[in-house]
Amino acid sequence: MPEAVYAKLLAIFETIALGWVAARARWLGDARDGAAAVRVLSAVSFNLFVPALLFRTMARLDLAALPWRTLAAYFVPVCTWLLAVYLLQRRAAAAHGPAAPATRAIGATYGNAVQLGIPLAAALFGEAGLGIHIALVSVHGLILLTLLTVLVEADLARVDHRSTWASTLRTTVRNTVVHPVVLPVLAGLACNLAGFGLPAVVDQALAGLGAAVVPVCLVLIGASLHAYDVEGRVPSAATLAAVKLVALPALVLVVAHWGFGVDGTALAVVVTMAALPVGSNALLFAQRYATLQGEASAAIVLSTLAFVVSAPLWLALLAWLAR
């Protein structure tokens, strides 16, 4: 991989380490309740910074310019994989609560597509490849986070044994729509379709809030490594990392190339997108639903470390297929 990508990986680890140091040194609050500071950081990210980023992205998205066949070649296998992992985890993760299956499913599908994915696509595939990657990123949250939110809210509503089928449906719909992820996506899409442009002052405010997502989330990962029992979660986190780095890109490669007929730069971009390490949204999801926070934090770190080895292997395979 290019030196610029390795530099980006190093910067990621440095910021995570700073988050760990900040938690250990009590810069984020009283060490007797280190998890409290983590919960505050997570709440601010999930309820303020992430919604601003999603709303602005959807409101500014050029829907007519999206490469729909390439998007389908990526999201069909990824959504299928997400649902398969979710269904398998319905039993395996039952002991961790009703939100655990969806939390593991996001770890197995949602990659670090912005902070690591954008510079990687720009360095490896040039302007054409970066354009395809940006198109994928633009609807990444809309499709995957919305689907995951529906799944987790349905599971939470279902465990309320006092609920009827109708009340479960109402609760699921209400909690899915009035949600820090889905609502700003829908609102931004509505503004886009209605042709409402963002006033400059609003756009600048949203851009500033959205820019905080990456650094705050990386600090949050480091603080979570200190606050939660990560040591006992390493085996499951390593499995999640392996699934994300190996199994998902293999599935995307097969479906995109032999199913949708995608090749060349577009194929390289979608496979590389699938091969990215676990993204910080996995931890935000775990924090919001108070489940598997240590596992999510460990999976992010382990998969990012392993990406240094797995990425060149995928790039070599793509180069061989292109001959």
Image (cartoon, rainbow, N blue to C red):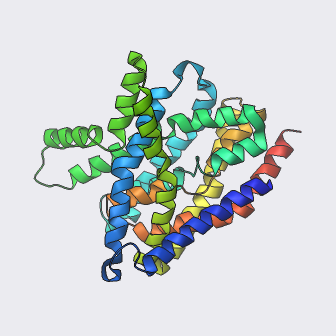
Q: Quadrant of residue 278?
A: bottom right
Name the spot of residue 126 as percent of width and height, x first: 77, 37
Viewport quadrant of the N terminus: bottom right
| Residue placed furthest toward the front | 201
Residue 218: % across, % down: 51, 61
For the C terminus, give its image quadrant: top right
In-front residue for pair 183/158: 183
Whether residue 211 is visible to the viewer of this picture, yes or no, is: yes
Question: From the viewer's perspective, is 252 left or right of 91?
Answer: right
Tell me which corner region of the image, top left, top right, bottom left or bottom right, holds residue 186.
top left
State whether residue 121 is above or below residue 28: above
Q: What percent of the width, then of the height, locates residue 9? A: 67, 61
Residue plotted at (39% across, 19% down): 196
Residue 134 vertical position relative to residue 242 in the rendered view, above or below: above
For the residue pair 176 and 263, the one nearer the viewer reads as 176
- In this view, the residue farthest toward the right is 323
Residue 251 falls left or right of residue 42: right
Q: Is residue 100 in view?
A: no
> How far across and down, in percent of the image, does residue 87 sit?
41, 52
Above or below, 272 relative to 23:
above
In this rendering, position of residue 182 left or right of residue 22: left
